[in-house]
Amino acid sequence: MGLKAKRKLGNTITYIVLVIISVIWLFPFVCLFLQSLRSYNEAGGGMVEYLLPKQFSLDSYIFLFSQDSKFVRWYLNTLIIACFVALFQTIVVLCVSYALSRMRFKGRTFLMRFWLILGMFPGFLTMICLYFLLKQFHLTQAGAIPGLILISVASSGMGYYVTKGYFDTIPKALDEAARIDGASRARVFLTMIIPMSKPIIIYAALVAFMAPWCDYVFASYVAFGYTDSYNVAVAMQNWVWTNDYQGYFTRFCAGGMLVAVPVTILFICLQKYYVEGVTGGAVKG
Amino acid sequence: MGNSTDSGKKSKVGKFFSGVGYDLKEIGLTFTQGDWKTKVSYLIMGFGPIMRRQFLRGIAFLAAEALFILYLVKFGWKYLQDIGTLGTVARVMNDDGTISYNDNSFLILLYGLLTIIIIGIFLFVWRMNVRENRNEEKLLAAGKPLSTAKKDLYSLLDSQFDKTLLALPVLGIFVFTVLPIIFMICIAFTDYDANHQPPANLFTWVGLENFKNLFSFGTTGLGSTFLTVLAWTLIWAFFATFLTYFCGMGVAIMINKKGIKFKKLWRTILVMTIAVPQFVSLLYVYKMFANDGLVNSYLLKWGWISSRIPFWSDPMLAKVMIILINLWIGIPYTMLITTGLLMNIPDDLYESAKIDGASGFQMFKSITLPYMLFVTGPFLLTQFTGNLNNFNVIYLLTQGGPQSMKLSNKAGYTDLLVTWLYKMTVDDTNYRMAAVLGIMIFVVTAVISLVVYNMLPSVKDEEGFQ
């Protein structure tokens, strides 16, 4: 009886803690949602000292889709970047991972070590050089969208760890059996390994898709003040940081909701694959 | 230990030199023993293979040589010859009063480096060409048939499939990562800054001056600022890694506890902070804690405080806030990773511990924790080095502020090395010091990775927990 009561008490405490944690975790998002619904008549859309709007309205959302705002354009920019990066980055990562996991060629360990060392340099170090290279190909400012896709995809080969780890767990005997039957490496890769790797492909594509939504540094540097090429992160950052953000606070909240909701839904739907990917990657290191 | 690695290094260097010696010897032998086709191939690459009806390979070699010479004559040479000075005349005033730009240090350095690398690659291809000739002669002498173009192409999908797969990724990494990094390392030894901007001005080599500047503690040097920022970077990375790790594991244990319902719901709620793009969530939280933000307003309204709390303008408070808010972002991540691992610990370990009368905390200390530390060692290391360069959390919350007159070059109290580097590049265009800082970040990351990696229990003793 005593033990049972003790366990019950322990569980109750755990529930209380979990509820508190959940409230902390969700509170900012609830605030964000409520603020996005505040009417423009209250403090002109600036920050206010209370949480519940006195006057609910969709003013901010209407503004985002109106002619005065380039929000739709920014949104589409980001969506285009995200889709292309997800597609190409996944392909690159799969190719690199298969080569490194299955083939033994001269320079293989050198390549892996070399990439590991390259990864220790901070990414922002090379910003000016990248900007200059892109400029040579006319991929800055007006051409920033393809430029950003190119930069993300070009160096994505170095992020092969998780996928290679997954390929390593697929038995090599399968490859060898197919090769004895006369299938080429390319055939084995395309018709056997790829179909077996659905979870890891979804993981790689999901991670690649989510990254551009947060990309502020390169996106702002490459667009260089050309507002048509902004992505949502750059544009909305400017709303918050420039001095006249007062009028834009609720608009930032509304825009934030429009960005966060689809991405979050997508993520929650594919959560299973994400968990599989990160756990696999973490344990293998 | 030290001795064995030393001798390992020596043998590696020795291997390299004996490899070069062997190569040179083979090049000489191929020339003296080879027929006239092979000898011509030393000058005109691919001549031998073409004469032996190996058209695909021969033409590929020939084309490589033609492209190389074309590149060097049309483009590369004019940059390469100036790389020692990085240009002498930036602008020329023409007679009609217009200005024409002459030498551009940036271009000279970038394309000069590119040319050096391309020369290296060409030498490698030339060596391949020599070996190809030797192999063909050997095969013919043995009376064996040479490979056909069709076979060559098929091998790219089969035995040499790695070349097909890796060609584009390696090229991409070379152009957009390797070349820029080499370029920026060189910039650390030049005076490229706001006063030396091409095309209007030249920059040139200055040796180790920038490194001296970073480590000089006088009134003009960056020494004390650098140490302040470095110290905070390390403190931040330590707390950000280990606090999230232990809290995340705690949350995972709570959710996994027997008798707790809605496990999936709790996890999904926590995962929200991974799913929502950080620029939305972090910027909003930044505004919540701002001087006129929600938190201060409500605390004032309820009478809990009499003046607004300077969350972001007090250095100490800002640092604490950053670490706490990072928990909000970081805990779910560790929670996900540890959840799976916790389930791997066999239940009978706990059962027998319970029979021995161990308390919950004792079980955690002597079963759960050692196992988790063993398995997640490499993960912790990558987390730590990732946090050293965690740009988003810092920049979205404080942008490195609060700034201070005590720190030079616009550094603030919460600046990490990487955000400071960003400010130097974007706000100050002080590329020379940014490059030095980048190299320092690399050194810090590399040293920590190497030292810690060799200390990891899972590396030292792979069988430990199996």
Image (cartoon, rainbow, N blue to C red):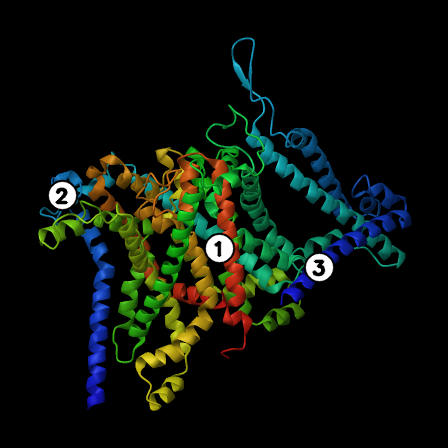
**Can residue A150 be seen here?**
no
Which quadrant of the figure has residue B66?
top right
- The reply to whether dot 3 and dot 2 touch (C-beta < 8 Å) is no
> Percent position (x, y) of residue B379?
45, 64
- The reply to whether dot 2 and dot 1 touch (C-beta < 8 Å) is no
B384 and B224: which is toward the camera: B224
Q: Is residue B41 left or right of residue B397?
A: right
> Percent position (x, y) of residue B339?
37, 71
| Type of the residue with mark 1 | Thr
Please tell me which residue is depicted at 86% across the width and 53% down the height of the picture. B137
Q: Residues within 10 Å of mark 3 (few under 14, many from 20)?
A: few
Alpha carbon separation for disc pair 2 and 1: 43 Å
Please tell me which residue is depicted at 26% across the width and 48% down the height of the picture. B286
Q: For the residues carrying marks 3 and 2, which lies nearer the camera in this image?
A: 3
- The reply to whether dot 3 and dot 1 touch (C-beta < 8 Å) is no
Task: Report the residue marked by disc 2.
Answer: A39
Task: Report the residue marked by disc 1.
Answer: A90
Q: Residues within 10 Å of mark 1 (few under 14, many from 20)?
A: many
